[in-house]
Image: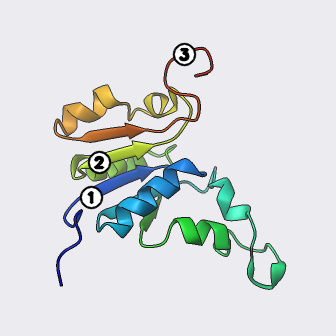
Amino acid sequence: MAKPPLSGIRVCDFTWVWAGPYCTLQLAHLGAEVIRIETKTRPCVTRMLPPWPDGVFNSLNKSGYFNQYNQGKKSLSLNFKHPEAKEAAWRLIKNSDVVINNFAAGVLEKMGFGYEEVKKVNPNVVMITLSGYGDTGPYSH
């Protein structure tokens, strides 16, 4: 059996909600190792969307919608209020081929993980931003 086309590629996934998780799902299906970074202080809203087993929302881990769009990915929960969490994220970024986010313009930069900072530790990184209204222009903020 042939190796998938993105086998050996690691993706550091800062995405949430629709476009980002769908994009990284496709990368995982093509063989990339996708490591999703989440935080319990602001969980992905799709964790709260139906369908749920028995039609009852009683856990952030039971959304059929969330599980559909995040299959085949690894997940890491970090609390960025702690320096150790940022250090863990930097280790992952340093050892990734792709860093992707779909936050609003400027959010990743405010977190300290903007492209200018990322390329200092990983000059070969491919950075993808899928913000809903773009990073520039009249609706970016």
Q: Are marks 2 and 3 in contact (CB under 8 Å)?
A: no
Q: Let me know if residue 78 appears in the view.
A: no
Which is more toward the observer, 8 or 12? 8
Residue located 17% across and 78% down the image: 2
- The amino acid type, in three-letter code, at marker 3 is Gly
Mark 3 sits on what residue?
137
| Residue extending furthest toward the front | 2
Q: Let me know if residue 102 appears in the view.
A: yes
The label number, if any, that marks residue 10 in the structure image: 1
| Residue extending furthest toward the top | 138
Query: If the image is split into quadrants, where does the N terminus sit?
Result: bottom left
Q: Is residue 28 above or below residue 17?
A: below
Q: Is residue 8 above or below residue 62?
A: above
How packed is label 1: few (under 14 Cα within 10 Å), some, or many (20 or more)?
A: many
Which is more toward the observer, 77 or 137? 137
- The amino acid type, in three-letter code, at marker 1 is Arg
Query: If the image is split into quadrants, where does the C terminus sit?
Result: top right
Q: CA distance from mark 2 to mark 3?
A: 25 Å
Mark 2 sits on what residue?
98
How packed is label 2: few (under 14 Cα within 10 Å), some, or many (20 or more)?
A: many
